[in-house]
Image: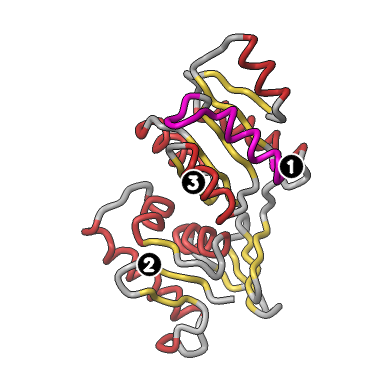
Amino acid sequence: MKLLVVDDDPDLLALVAFALTNAGYAVIKASDTAEALRAFDAELPNLVILDINLPSGSGFDVCKAIRGRSEVPVMMLTARGDEEDLVRALELGADDYLTKPFSPRTLLARVKALLRRAGIEQGDMVQAGRVSLDLEAHAISIDGGAPLRLTRLETRLLQILVAQAGHVVSAERLLAHVWGHRGSGDRQLLKQLVHRLRQKLEKDPAGADLLHTESGVGYRLKV
């Protein structure tokens, strides 16, 4: 499940992305109108969280452009609480409107409600190609085989790799998703976790049939 978050405040953008990532969503970030539309076209997110005040345009412009090409749920996120802004956002096709400041818990509740209404609610099963991942049971099935038990960290790592199946996920993004922090010194933790998963999942761990390493970048789940 991919969510696009657009905000020109780097601290708030990081906070929102962290909260959503910890809730199990794959997050794409953008900080201006052009970057937001490029990310939308490239990633095809399931939901967009969009600030009104953006450089070189506004969230209204982005919302209008998105509505011209998709019915994906859009939540406007802004410090402006004027009724005029709310009416304009809804007229442009926004589905919800959340005023800053807000709590991560409130944000997550509104995101889940939007996804439910759109019929794309995040469930306990995540699938891509040969892989079926049960998030609640911490188990994975490959090619319809018997489920294999996973640790909590292994499940979190596979969750984002399955969500981005076929695409390279950077080491920094994986670190933030699995452990909630990032840093070059922590890459060894990630390498060890990937190694344990390969020993558990791969017929030939050295062959990297499922978990492929992109040298110096990150990892990709092959589908």
Query: Residue 211: horizontal and vertical position, in percent?
Result: 47, 76
Crowdedness near tag 3: few (<14), some (14–19) or many (≥20) residues, C-alpha within 10 Å: many
Viewer-proximal residue among 100 and 159: 100
Residue numbers of the magenta segment: 53-72
Query: Residue 5: horizontal and vertical position, in percent?
Result: 51, 39
Query: Mark 2 and mark 1: span between their CA atoms?
Result: 32 Å
Corner quadrant of residue 172: bottom left
Camera-side mark, 3 or 1:
1
On the image, numbered disc 3 is attached to which residue?
A: 21
| Residue type of the residue flagged with mark 1 | Glu
Viewer-proximal residue among 65 and 79: 65
How many numbered discs?
A: 3
On the image, numbered disc 1 is attached to which residue?
A: 71
Q: Residue at x 71, y 23 (%)?
A: 90
Corner quadrant of residue 187: bottom left
Q: Tell me the SS state at disc 2.
A: strand
Corner quadrant of residue 143: bottom right
- Quarter of the picture containing the C terminus is bottom right
On the image, numbered disc 2 is attached to which residue?
A: 218
Query: Residue 63: horizontal and vertical position, in percent?
Result: 62, 34
Query: Mark 3 and mark 1: span between their CA atoms?
Result: 23 Å
Viewer-proximal residue among 65 and 163: 65
Q: Is residue 104 above or below residue 42?
A: above
Q: Residue at x 72, y 30 (%)?
A: 93
